Image (spheres, grey):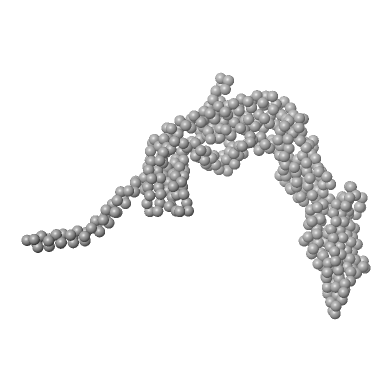
Amino acid sequence: MENVRHLFNGIAFFLLLSCAPAVSNVNALQTSELEKPSWVSSKPVSGFYYVGIGYSQKSSSENYLQSSKQNALDDMISEIRVNISSVSVLNQMDNTDGFSEQYESMIKTTASDDVEGYELVDTWEGDGQYWTYYRLSKEKYRDRKAAKRRNVLDLATDNYLKANQLIEKGEIASGLTLYINGLYTMAPYLGESNEISVGGDSILLGNALYDKIQNTFNDLVITSEQEQYLINRRLSKDESIEVAVRTKSENNQVSEFPLMANFSTGAGIVIPEYTTDEDGVATILLSSIRSKESKQVITIMPDIDKLTPENTDTKKYGLLLKSLQLPQKKLQLQIQKPVVYLESVEKKLGEPVSSKQVSDKIKQLLSEEGFTFGRIKDKADLWVEVAADTAKGKASGSIYITYFNLSINVIDMTTGAEIHHAGIDRLKAYSLNYGRSSQSGYDKALEILEKETMPKLIEEILR
């Protein structure tokens, strides 16, 4: 009997060992499925919380914990909807160029700065990933946002009232700066109605600020003494053009007002930034005409950047002012071609030649750049003297060497001063005789003249 009992125990032990691995694998699979929470596969929907689910691949080169958290917060913020009120100032603004989409993106970016009080609900690790589950009470978020909005409205209202007083006193630039500051301050809430009481009247503050800015600009006019200015493309000195800023309603000069100038047609160098003096006048300085166009335009308009308070994030909020209609003054420029008197003495081996290869090339290049040529030196703007010659070098067997020399002087006929000198000194050439070698020197010089010498000369006399 004892032997039978030992035999039975041995068989039972053997069966237990053979079954153990299969049971262990089933349990491991069941444990893995049980550990993976449902929120990993399906994002929870809640009427009381904003929910954010984030994950990151585990990696030694990345802080996957922080990355997963940030992804969850970004996911949470994406649930915060932007509803633009039908009476908000945004409906007054130009909605082209994707304005609404840009504004919505801006608000969501701002919302990320306001997200506080969120809480971690759960985490899960598996399959080389780290998952996080965060949530934020919608009620707490609304309460916190409402408190911030009240503070913003108070500040914007203060800007609005102070700006009204400055505009009434004629301090236009300072008043505009406060209006703009108020609008930027309210930027995250401009999609809402923002109704406040001022002097017993109810106003929509965002709309009122925007209207005040636009109406103030509408009341400004920029004038100049002439409608068109005749200007030689080759400026011997800076050209100055006076413009004035006044109000239409009272015809008052507007002092300390920032302006900007730029070529809207053509090209050149004009000082870009100005501020009107106590008489409302600014002197526009033009130092170079680079375009060959006969009619060019410089546009003068308010410098919004200078009216915008410092430390304003214009990259984020700058689009708010893009739809404004600004006063402009277009200065019409009638461009005169500079007149050149050209004198040329060209030789080969000391003997005059009838073919003026250098002067012909200079005429061609100057004509292409908008210059013209005259026959009377005293009536020209520029006098160009050209001297070219070749000299014999050594002869070695059948090879004859020559040296080409060129001198170009440019004189300003208004002042009599030399304004540019260029030359080519001892340019070496060779051929089967001195005549061919001289022509080879001319050929090489003409190439240098076109690619190097004349571009520098033209830039110098037009700057």
Q: Position of residue 246 (x, y in %)?
A: 73, 30
From this viewpoint, which residue is outermost toward the front?
Answer: 2
Q: Position of residue 229 (x, y in %)?
A: 80, 41
Q: Position of residue 151 (x, y in %)?
A: 53, 28
> Which one is in front, 39 or 100?
39
Q: How many marks?
A: 0
Describe residue 160's horizontal placement relative to residue 83 as left or right.
right
Describe residue 135's horizontal placement relative to residue 230 as left or right.
left
Q: Name which quarter of the figure residue 167 lies in.
A: top right
Describe residue 322's horizontal placement relative to residue 54 as left or right.
right
Q: Is residue 211 visible?
A: no
Name the residue at 84% across, 50% down: 338
> Which one is in front, 37 or 334?
37
Name the residue at 56% across, 35% down: 187
* Above-or-below relation of 420 to 298: below
Q: Is residue 133 visible?
A: yes
Q: Position of residue 264 (x, y in %)?
A: 71, 44
From this viewpoint, which residue is outermost toward the top?
Answer: 200
Name the residue at 85% across, 60% down: 423
From this viewpoint, which residue is outermost toward the left?
Answer: 1
- Can you say which quadrant of the picture contains the N terminus? bottom left
Describe residue 383's horizontal placement relative to residue 294 as left or right.
right
Name the residue at 71% across, 29% down: 247
> Which one is in front, 303 or 394?
394
